[in-house]
Amino acid sequence: MKSLKTLGLAIFIFSFGLFIVSVTLSRHQLSDTAIQPMKKYHGLMLKEQAGDEFNKEYASNLAFISGIEVLLNKTKEALDKASGVDPANNVWNATTLPDGVGEWDYRMSDYDVKTYTASLTTATATGGMLPNNVGLFFFLIFVLGSIGALMYILPGLQKLPGIKHDGIFQSSFTKGIIPILQTVAVGTTIGISCYMAYMEPQAQLYFVGTALFTLVVMTLIFLAERRERKEPGAPTKTSIGNGWMGVVMGTFLISFYIILYFYPHYIANWVLLVDPIKQFLSGGKHADRWFLYGFLYCLVMVVMGIRMLVKYRHNRYQLIRTGSVIFFQLAFAFLLPEILGRLNNPSVNLLTPWPLDYSFFAEYRLNGMLVENENYFLGMNVGTGMFIWGILLTLVVVPLFTYLYGKRWYCSWVCGCGGLAETLGDPFRQLSDKSVRAWRVERYVIHAVMVFVTVMTLVLIYHYITGEESILGISANGIKEWYGFLIGSVFAGVVGTGFYPLMGNRMWCRYGCPLAGLMGLVQRFKSRFRITTNGGQCISCGNCSTYCEMGIDVRHYAQRGQDIVRASCVGCGVCSAVCPRGVLRLENSGEDVNDRALDVRNIHVQMDEVTYL
């Protein structure tokens, strides 16, 4: 079995390496076909500005990106000049455009420049190894890579069922980083993200910054561990710092999310790999970065979900729960939006309530549901039905189910963010900070996010009803863009997932998710869910606290026989699954919970009948 795991790991590393290299394996040529999806006047002006370079072939996507960014900016300036824009105050004064042509049908915004850079990089890939062999590369990267990963995972079935620590705090992959480096890592990542997203047009500086950050962290780790090893009686492997594998994986995840959100043109070849799947599901539409992300999300959840099933096969609750999050991700988060889009309906996940779906009340979303949608199903407008369902999901379904089952019904059974944390992030769940300091930070940060999203939503609703751009000086579009950037992108993606190997797998759920915060308030004060404990049976092994991904010191409650009703608990049940004595039980009960749990909280001693001769 060891040789099978080694072979599987080698196959996976080959596929992953090919995945990285594939971003460069294409040639690009700007043509009439490539610019066809652009707005009419944008495409015509781009062709005019390109001149003799219009049909020029670029040897790589990096060369094409550099060239097309210059052309698009020249096009933007030419359109502004032709439409009579005053450069001093950017006022549009056009009076000669055809009837029905609006300002932004003609002018080009900075957002258009970024969007066209990504779409044209994909559309112009007409030659090179990858565009000419998409099927082969898809097999070598995704199919073969998944087979290699499963070859590494499935031999775990040969081990006895049950949970073992297996050196999780000594492995260079799962050790985590010490608190001072956590602060440095979070601060540096957010700082670089802000700088690169709004000030620096070239992504190369980000890669330099990330590389320097990685080098500094690894140097600090090396020096700290070297100092500890020199101390008398120090063990061979210390508990401080993080190994190089965790740092490298964290760096890759952080880099991936920043490129995905802010520089998608650099991963245009990855989009090409999944384009045939997108066309099949959507009836001919082409893939974009979000379809690529959804595909990767599902693939990773399935493969790592199988790992989860193997690891926790001794616990029925974990088997059903893991199957549930995989199903909802595949069916509702990935396939259903594609089906809705094919039917000319808004492509939304119908199981994402506000405030997790923070753009639900944005003008374009409300118009798409209430104004522009003309499809009917069983006599009801589909868009109107989506709007009503979104309101009911937020105001009725979420609080009711949280009252009955706690926040676990969503966070551990339905949510895609939680599903990725439970599958891809499971090897790092023990890295969550259990300190009181972390708990205090958690409460302040998550409640600040809840206030932020509430204010933003009120401003968006006011803007939609009145048409006023701002209220009390707060711009509707501005606050939405800042929330989307800071919370939706940097926090939920870059930090929330990128920091799995550094600080644990529920960073976003614990510190940032506003829906988890709202459900946590219901769970804390008005819910039938709790984890009951039998303190008399607790042997203080610490497994429960070690594996709690939300940073709860479960052992503290278990030793005292106290119910766990913490607002942050997502009810994953892993603490119960790893308990060797059956001390912890997940309960959905009302006022009678103490009476029902009394029997398991007592120690029962049975004396066998003694026969005297």
Image (cartoon, rainbow, N blue to C red):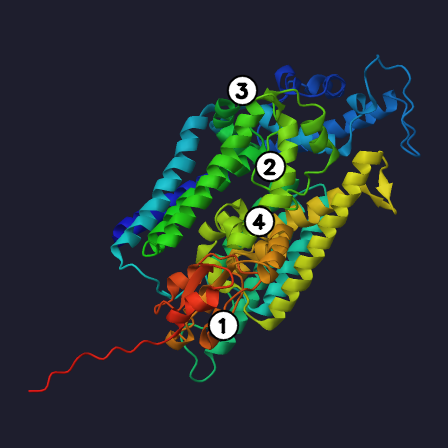
Q: Quadrant of residue 575?
A: bottom left
Q: Residue furthest top?
A: 98
Q: Which residue is mark 1?
A: 562
Does the CB distance between marks 1 and 2 fall below 8 Å? no
Element carrying mark 3? loop
Quarter of the image where the C terminus is located:
bottom left
Amino acid found under the numbered disc labelled 2: Tyr
Helix, strand or loop for disc 1:
loop
Which residue is rendered at x = 10% and y = 86% of the image? Answer: 612
- Give the crowd class for mark 3: few <14, some 14-19, many >=20 residues within 10 Å: few
Disc number for residue 266: 2
**Kind of residue sitting beneath label 4:** Leu
| Disc 3/disc 2 C-alpha distance (Å) | 24 Å
Of labels 2 and 4, earlier in sequence is 2
Question: In the rendering, at what x and y percent does residue 378 appear?
Answer: 57, 22
Mark pair 1, 3: CA separation: 57 Å
The label shown at residue 400 is 4
* Circles 4 and 3 in contact, beta carbons < 8 Å: no
In-front residue for pair 155/127: 155
Front position in the image: 5 or 474: 474
**Nearer the N terminus, badge 3 or badge 2?**
2
Quadrant of residue 300 in the image? top left
Locate residue 434, reporting x and y percent: 54, 69
504 w.r.t. 485: above or below: below
Residue 161 left/right relative to 369: left
Q: Give the distance between the C-alpha atoms of the residues marked 4 and 3, in whole angstroms.
A: 40 Å
Q: Could you tell whether 442 is left or right of 155 in the image?
A: right
Counting labels gives 4
Between the residue at mark 1 and the residue at mark 2, the CA separation in whole angstroms equals 52 Å
Label 4: which secondary element: helix
